[in-house]
Image: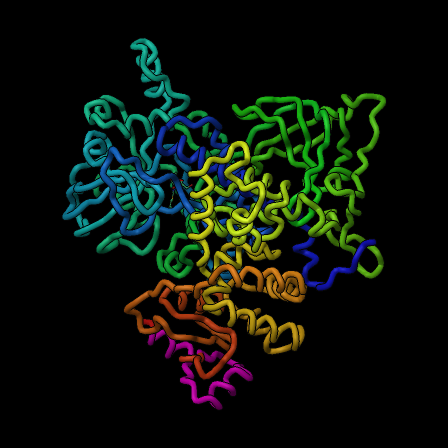
């Protein structure tokens, strides 16, 4: 039977497939693997478009399913850790990455997002620079008193390799900055690349000498820069464009374009195609122009980059995870191929979601052999009328597991039949249903197995998640072992993991007698399990696999409540007092938390068997309080602030982000623990509460003065 959605607010979330933990894990591993190949070995196996597709798919999945986001998600990191052979250099300002736009709509949305954040009206000017996105490798070059003193690769974004000796051999990079206004210290950032003609000549010479032939100019540039012998780098005609900066003691302009003009005046190469535009239409026109010019540029580009021109705006916009809010990369489109779809497989994930996967006749798309494609869900199959035996167009843009974009109907076999999506779980044969509203209309695109804990697929997947790297991180207890322990009845619940050793010792068939297990490995496993008898609150929350609670959300909750008991008390109060209550709102008001998450918490903790699970786990392990990294030495670090009423100089999101950046905790409700209430116009009950409790009330201006 279809069941009613419990919360109307969830329809939007429910409209997305959520059985993706596995795909996220696979994507993360795949991206890390390709990162290492790309950044460390300069020998990628896949095209950049395919790589972007992986990242885009991951971002999409993480956005739709924040509960599944991994702490080590490659979406949070850039590049790969530095290679030991080069010395390491810590970037004073991290070298982050750019968010991607793949369509005109994404570009329009970027403009809107920026305006919304800054509260800049539609008819007010918002200048945005546009420039080609150079497909090379990024570098940070430090000049002190105008002298090049150090150069570092991006590495993992925080720490790169010291390639100073090699960078000094690049002719286009000045050893000394000339002219006026050169600051005492500046980290100039840009891209090192190799032109097409130089690349061809280099490869011809390499082939002739029996050396390494590079797959593309980017790899050749990276390989050339990362030579331990700088004499080799000197022979490669590497080039450079400056487009950004990190630490700087002073800047000579208050716009992006202005600073780049200064760079140029100091002798640094800046891309001549850079243009200052006034947003969406002009940006898109620029993109089209560059797309047409692309082939004739003489160097590889993989899109264009847009940046908010005013630096004070950039500062206010700040960063979100790995990318600035003030810039975006508009990428060129990805590649497609045609193949036969042999079969549609149904996979069952840890939440019981049935996910259709197309098994394809292997085909090369953008240099990678593809044999699986995601079909998303049954509506998608029906909408595109995808059938077994069809010839389909497969695309790797935005998808690691590529997507079927189109069916070639003229190639359809005459005996083909529409695909019938199963209504029972292929693993446990329980009914598989879709959430529906009161009228019986499906509101969830995902069909789920109702087998819950009796469905081996779900229990096993939950257990795998529980022990995974970003959850409990139990070394030596990977997916395969969980399969084995589950199938042999040794582990059927999370708490069983911690009683495994005791039960094993009392058992007739201890693990040491099982084929494939050796005494040392068993001992190691037990001690790895013991090592996790203490786990931080955020990891614990994430490990529970609560719907919509990924790593980021788990951290937000842990940060807000500190201890499991405090969180449980808050959730219990919300369960008791209901949706309209202060208790509910208190959770909802936490930065990063919305109704979907509060509802998911309520659903999870209302289930007696989940409470039993937690109690059983707490018998075995200690959940340690969350330790908040302290931002010190700001006037508001460690203070609790509540914003209320309408702010005029800052938007609410900006005010929150700024306060948090300065180490304050932003809360949604006023209590005795509140340090400041910042009251804008028409502040209501929160202001009254603040006064009643004797909490310091600040106007928006007073707040801005306080934070300087
Ligand atoms: S601005 C905070 N501008 O693209 C990031 N990046 O995908 C500032 N890239 O890491 C980067 N051309 O290696 C910027 N004109 C350009 C670029 C550019 C290429 C690279 C750069 C960056 C990556 C992000």
Residue 700 colored in magenta in the image: yes
Residue 391 colored in magenta in the image: no
Q: Quadrant of the C terminus?
A: bottom left
605 and 145: which is toward the camera? 605
Whether 537 is drawn above or below 178: the answer is below
Q: Is residue 568 visible?
A: yes
Residue drawn at x 23%, y 33% as measured from the top left: 167
**Taking the image as four quarters, which one is ligand 1 found in?**
top left
Where in the figure is residue 80, as x and y percent of width and height?
37, 39
534 and 548: which is toward the camera? 534
Q: What's the coloring here? A: rainbow
Residue drawn at x 30%, y 51% as measured from the top left: 93
288 and 303: which is toward the camera? 303
Where in the figure is residue 374, as x and y percent of width and height?
65, 36
Residue drawn at x 33%, y 75% as measured from the top left: 705
Q: In this figure, what is the number of numbered marks?
A: 0
What is the quadrant of residue 480 in the picture? top right
Magenta residues span 678-706
Left or right of 272: which side holds 587? right
216 and 51: which is toward the camera? 51
Residue drawn at x 44%, y 63% as measured from the top left: 624
Left or right of 4: which side holds 652? left
Q: Quadrant of the N terminus?
A: bottom right
Where in the figure is residue 190, as x and y percent of width and height?
32, 40
Q: Is residue 280 visible?
A: no
Where in the figure is residue 303, as x and y percent of width and height?
46, 36
């Amino acid at each position: 039977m279809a069941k009613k959605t419990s919360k109307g607010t969830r329809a939007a979330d429910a409209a997305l497939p959520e059985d993706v933990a596995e795909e996220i894990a696979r994507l993360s591993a795949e991206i890390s693997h390709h990162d290492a190949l790309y950044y460390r070995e300069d020998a990628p196996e896949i095209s950049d478009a395919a790589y972007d597709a992986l990242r885009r798919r991951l971002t999409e999945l993480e956005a739709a399913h924040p509960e599944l986001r991994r702490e080590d998600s490659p979406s949070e990191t850039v590049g790969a850790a530095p290679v030991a052979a080069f010395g390491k250099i810590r970037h004073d300002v991290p070298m982050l990455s750019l968010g991607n736009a793949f369509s005109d709509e994404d570009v329009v949305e970027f403009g809107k997002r920026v305006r919304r954040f800054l509260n800049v009206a539609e008819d007010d000017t918002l200048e945005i620079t546009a420039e080609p996105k150079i497909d090379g490798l990024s570098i940070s070059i430090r000049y002190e008193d105008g002298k090049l003193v150090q150069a570092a690769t991006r590495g993992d974004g925080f720490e790169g390799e010291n390639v100073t000796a090699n960078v000094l051999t690049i002719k286009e990079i000045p050893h000394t900055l000339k002219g006026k206004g050169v600051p005492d210290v500046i980290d100039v950032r840009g891209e090192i690349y190799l032109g097409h003609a130089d690349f061809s000549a280099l490869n011809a010479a390499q082939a002739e000498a029996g050396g390494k032939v590079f797959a593309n100019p980017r790899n050749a540039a990276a390989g050339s820069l990362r030579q331990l012998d700088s004499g080799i780098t000197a022979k490669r005609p590497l080039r450079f464009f400056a487009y950004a900066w990190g630490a700087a003691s002073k800047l000579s302009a208050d716009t992006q374009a202005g600073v780049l003009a200064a760079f140029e005046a100091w002798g640094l190469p800046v891309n001549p195609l850079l243009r200052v535009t006034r947003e969406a239409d002009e940006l898109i026109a620029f993109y089209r122009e560059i797309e047409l010019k692309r082939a004739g540029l003489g160097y590889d580009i993989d899109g264009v980059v847009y940046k908010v021109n005013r630096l004070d705006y950039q500062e206010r916009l700040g960063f979100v995870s790995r990318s600035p809010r003030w810039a975006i990369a508009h990428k060129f489109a990805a590649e497609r191929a045609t193949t036969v779809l042999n079969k549609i497989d149904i996979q069952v994930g840890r939440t019981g979601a049935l996910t259709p996967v197309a098994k394809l006749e292997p085909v090369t798309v953008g240099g990678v052999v593809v044999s699986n494609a995601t079909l998303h869900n049954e509506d998608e199959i029906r909408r595109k009328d995808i059938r077994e035996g069809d010839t389909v167009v497969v695309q790797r843009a935005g998808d690691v597991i590529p997507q079927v974009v189109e069916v070639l109907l003229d190639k359809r076999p005459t005996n083909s039949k529409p695909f019938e999506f199963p209504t029972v779980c292929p693993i446990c044969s329980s009914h598989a249903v879709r959430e529906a509203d009161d009228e019986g209309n499906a509101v969830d695109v995902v069909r789920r197995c109702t087998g819950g804990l009796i469905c081996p697929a779900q229990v096993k997947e939950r257990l795998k998640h529980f022990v995974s790297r970003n959850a409990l991180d139990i070394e030596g207890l990977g997916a395969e072992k969980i399969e084995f322990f589950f199938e042999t009845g040794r582990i059927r619940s999370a708490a069983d993991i911690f009683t495994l050793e005791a039960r094993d010792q009392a058992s007739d068939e201890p693990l040491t007698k099982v084929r494939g297990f050796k005494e040392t490995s068993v001992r190691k496993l037990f001690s790895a399990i013991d090592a996790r008898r203490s786990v931080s609150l955020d990891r614990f929350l994430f490990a529970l696999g609560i719907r919509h609670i990924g790593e980021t959300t788990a951290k937000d909750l842990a940060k807000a409540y500190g201890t499991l008991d405090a969180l449980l008390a808050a959730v219990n109060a919300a369960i008791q007092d209901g949706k309209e209550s202060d208790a509910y709102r208190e959770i909802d008001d936490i930065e990063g938390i919305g109704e979907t998450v509060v509802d998911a918490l309520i659903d999870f903790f209302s289930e007696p068997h989940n409470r039993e699970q937690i109690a059983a786990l707490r018998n075995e392990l200690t959940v340690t309080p969350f330790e908040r990294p302290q931002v010190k030495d700001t006037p508001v670090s460690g203070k609790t602030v509540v914003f209320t009423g309408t702010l005029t100089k800052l938007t609410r999101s900006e005010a929150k982000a700024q306060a948090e950046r300065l180490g304050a905790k932003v809360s949604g409700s006023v209590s005795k623990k509140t340090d400041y209430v910042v009251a804008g116009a028409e502040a209501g009950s929160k202001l009254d509460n603040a006064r009643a409790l004797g909490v310091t009330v600040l106007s928006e201006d007073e707040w801005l003065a306080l934070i300087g």
